[in-house]
Amino acid sequence: MTYKDTLEYLYHRLPMFSRVGAVAYKEDLHNTLALCASLGDPHRKIRTIHIAGTNGKGSVSHMLAAILQCSGYRTGLYTSPHLKDFRERIRIDGAMVSEDFVVSFTEKVMPMIDRISPSFFEITVAMAFDHFVENRVDVAVIETGLGGRLDSTNVITPELSVITNIGWDHMNILGNTIPAIAAEKAGIIKQDIPVVIGETDPETEKVFRDKAAASMSPIHFADSQWEIIGATNNGRHLELRVRHVADGRTADYALDLTGIYQMKNLVTVLEAVDRLRSVGWKIPDDKLRLGLSQTKKLTGLHGRWELIRERPMLVADVAHNEPGMRQLIAQIAATPHRRLHIVMGMVRDKDPSRLLMMLPLNATFYFTMAGIERALPAEDLKEMAAACGHNGNAYPNVNAAIDAALSSADEEDLIVVCGSIFLVGEINMLSVD
């Protein structure tokens, strides 16, 4: 097969969450374990760090990968979903997996695919493990897809588990209460393996402590160990001063991820680094700073308050759930602008009204949709928004909507594209090379 043929096969032969939603979610680990067994159990041959959470897990994964890479470790990184190129999901030291490997791996596992009918995600997880073993990585940072307990990535026994935070998302799969969602995420906590929790929450703290106690896993709440005591944003870097609560030491970091919500993610990363150092990982302070200052360059992370153009300022952010939207609104409020333009598209299985009610009433809206089956039609989103007091026009795709916003905006205005990861991935001006 050619690479193009292979992608067509993967996208259309296998159930893919981004296309069909919850029916692609497999509520057990049997297929992943069977795939890995057929490959010689690659997940048992690499050192890993496991990252889960409602929001921030992508940023934390990329930051940790950049830090480890700068510290001299050959570092694998598995994340999902991709924005433009399937190969974004699997990287080593920032380099995407080769087209040839994707083809050869797919051909190798076709008999297993016919036998057990795995999901798209299950195949990509096994592909990542196989690629990392073949290329002899020192460590692989593994981001969960959905939840944790039944997520395909949860076949690993990591060096460290990290759970960034818990919020409302994927309730149809993970549960209808915050503690229920937390219990699913807590499923990545393993026997005797330390876990870092990014944010302390009265609704979830007991869930995590109980799971950690049952697993005899040392538990560390990052926000009780670190605090941000100074922050400035020059547009290109978010410059932060942090203090360690226990010993009072301070440090300054410049992040190339400039969203103010990265302050919480930095605290999580710093505690994760401290835990790794405590068991022998060599992560010098200068390499820690370097990794944080070049995360986007080193790992290819995109879509987190990403500046695409200036005057008018055009920013893309993958905020698509209630906690993410709350952070995005705070970022908008902190960004100088004259008028606000919001280009928005969502998927069917979210709760559009809940998010729409959160958005500023003084914005001009441009409703659109991503080119996937799960996308909520732009006209439907427009009607829901009107009921929430937001008016605007509907457009067939995100680039048409952006063109309309650019035509209406003055140089001092702000245009924000949000609502769906898949929508951001279709922006023509966004490059992931």
Image: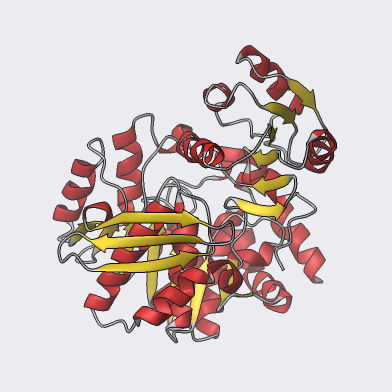
Q: Quadrant of the C terminus?
A: bottom right
Q: How is the image coloured?
A: secondary structure
Which residue is farthest top?
Answer: 387
Q: Is residue 296 left or right of residue 209?
A: right
Which of the image's four quarters has the N terminus? bottom right
Q: Nearer the viewer, residue 139 or 223?
A: 223
In the figure, is residue 242 to the left or right of 232?
left
- The residue positioned 26% from the left and 70% from the top of the image is 275
* Residue 391 percent coordinates (x, y): 71, 19
Count of numbered labels shown in the rendering: 0
Does the image show residue 369?
Answer: yes
Q: Position of residue 140 (x, y in %)?
A: 45, 74
> Would residue 190 be visible to someone looking at this image?
no
Where residue 208 appears, x then y in whole percent? 23, 48
Q: Residue at x 36, y 63 (%)?
A: 269
- Judge whether 96 appears above or below 183 on screen: below
Percent position of residue 417, x then y: 67, 41
Q: Residue at x 76, y 49 (%)?
A: 427
65 vs 342, nearest the viewer: 342
Of 98 and 398, which appears nearest the observer? 398
* Residue drawn at x 34%, y 30% as measured from the top left: 177
Instruction: From the viewer's side, name the closer residue of 19 and 339.
Output: 339
